[in-house]
Image (cartoon, rainbow, N blue to C red):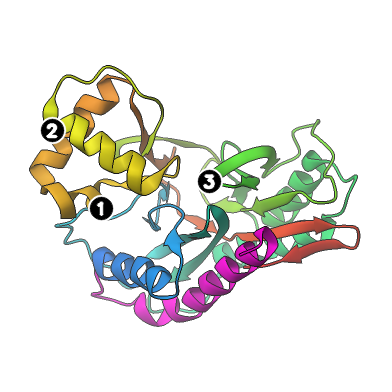
């Protein structure tokens, strides 16, 4: 499949899944049920997850995904952010939405959605990334909320989820000009907190970094599986637990992190425990503006 066609097909798959997510995000549904639906549907449609589905609730902003034995459930009033990535031959579609369990979209959700629309309207060759950030910030502050300043949108490349350019969620004062042919994902985060995220203690998503000396036999086997199955893309502890058991996986991953063979992504939470909403689309930068494919 040609590169452009792969991006578009991956985007069609994520768009179809997003249409079904709100009906699944209801009181009593487990994080694990939603994750298996999202990732299973990606595979059924002929693609692969570009990263583990991020299911981040309330003050959790990103990098949360269930474990193999996760019993957490959604509750009425929860802000559930669902960040979905599908890839075909390494060409990635990255998109996200927020659902408030048992309720319609409120102003916090509308803030990130409207910010995304405002950003997309700005996209064209020559526009600087900080100008897009300014449009995001203006839309979010118009609702009385704050953008999360240390999260950002990003470029997309083959087998690379986050590449340049970085698309900030506020006007940083300087940026780079978009170019025709750029492939980018814009993802505003709005919060009623202080507008920053910090690391939580949990690490549930990882990615391969480099080959290092690994003496432990189990760790060598797990590293081989990581390289073979996921390449440079992020993967979930849960995925490996289905192969090696949870206990063996946790042990091997800790060893591989210490050896700098893999990188562990910390779950991110709003620094003042504010609620967070997220919206995201992927797009081509064309001479006419943004061509959204998610």
Residues drawn in magenta? 1-30
From the image, give the main secondary structure of the stretch colored magenta. Answer: helix
- Residue 77 at x, y percent in the picture: 37, 70
Task: Judge by depth and name the residue closer to the eye, 54 or 247.
Answer: 247
Q: Looking at the image, tell me whether mark 1 or mark 3 is earlier in sequence order.
A: 3
Tell me the number on the disc at residue 285.
none
Q: Residue at x 36, y 36 (%)?
A: 266
Residue at the (43%, 52%) spot, across then down: 51
Q: Which residue is mark 3?
A: 159
**Residue 56 location, x and y as percent?**
39, 55
Asked whether residue 205 appears in the rendered view, the answer is no
Q: Is residue 27 magenta?
A: yes
User: Which quarter of the rendering shows the N terminus?
Assistant: bottom right
Residue that mark 2 sits on: 218
State if disc 2 and disc 1 touch (CB < 8 Å). no
In the foreground, 155 or 1: 1
- Residue 120, x across and y down, in percent: 76, 60
Q: Earlier in the sequence, mark 1 or mark 2?
A: 2
Residue at image location 35% in from the left, 39% down from the top: 227
Residue 217 relative to residue 254: left or right:
left
**Image-quadrant location for residue 280:** bottom right
Quadrant (top left, top right, bottom left, bottom right) of the C terminus: bottom right
Q: Which residue is mark 1?
A: 239
Judged by depth in the image, the label closer to the viewer, 1 or 3, is 3
Indicate the quadrant where residue 45 lies.
bottom left
Q: Nearer the viewer, mark 1 or mark 2?
A: 2
Location of residue 201 in the rendering, given as x and y in whole percent from the top left corner: 28, 34
The answer to whether 178 is drawn above or below residue 10 in the figure is above
- For the residues marked 1 and 2, what is the alpha-carbon distance in whole angstroms? 16 Å
Q: Is residue 122 magenta?
A: no
């Amino acid at each position: 499949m040609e590169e452009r066609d792969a991006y578009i097909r991956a985007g069609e798959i994520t768009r179809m899944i997003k249409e079904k997510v709100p009906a699944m995000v209801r009181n009593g549904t487990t994080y694990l049920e939603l994750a298996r639906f999202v990732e299973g549907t990606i595979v059924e449609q002929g693609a692969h997850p570009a990263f583990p589905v991020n299911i981040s609730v309330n003050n959790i902003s990103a990098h949360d995904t269930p474990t193999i034995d996760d019993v957490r459930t959604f509750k009425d009033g929860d802000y559930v952010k669902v960040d979905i990535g599908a890839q075909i031959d390494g060409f990635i579609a990255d998109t996200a939405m927020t659902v408030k369990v048992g309720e319609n979209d409120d102003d916090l959700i509308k803030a990130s959605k409207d910010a995304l629309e405002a950003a997309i309207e700005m996209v064209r060759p020559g526009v600087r990334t900080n100008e897009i950030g300014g449009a995001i910030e203006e839309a979010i502050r118009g609702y009385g909320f704050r953008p999360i300043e240390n999260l950002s949108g990003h470029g997309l490349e083959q087998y690379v989820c986050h590449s340049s350019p970085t698309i900030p969620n506020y006007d940083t004062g300087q940026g780079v000009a978009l170019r025709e042919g750029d492939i980018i994902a814009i993802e505003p985060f709005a919060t009623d907190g202080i507008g920053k995220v910090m690391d939580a203690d949990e690490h549930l998503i990882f990615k391969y970094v480099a080959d290092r000396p690994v003496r432990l036999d189990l760790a060598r086997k797990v590293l081989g599986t990581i390289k073979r199955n996921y390449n440079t893309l992020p993967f979930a502890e849960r995925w490996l637990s289905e192969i090696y058991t949870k206990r063996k996986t946790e042990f091997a991953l800790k060893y591989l992190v210490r050896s700098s063979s893999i990188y562990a992504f910390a779950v991110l939470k709003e620094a003042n425990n504010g609620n967070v909403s997220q919206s995201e689309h992927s797009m081509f930068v064309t001479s006419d503006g943004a061509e959204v494919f998610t």
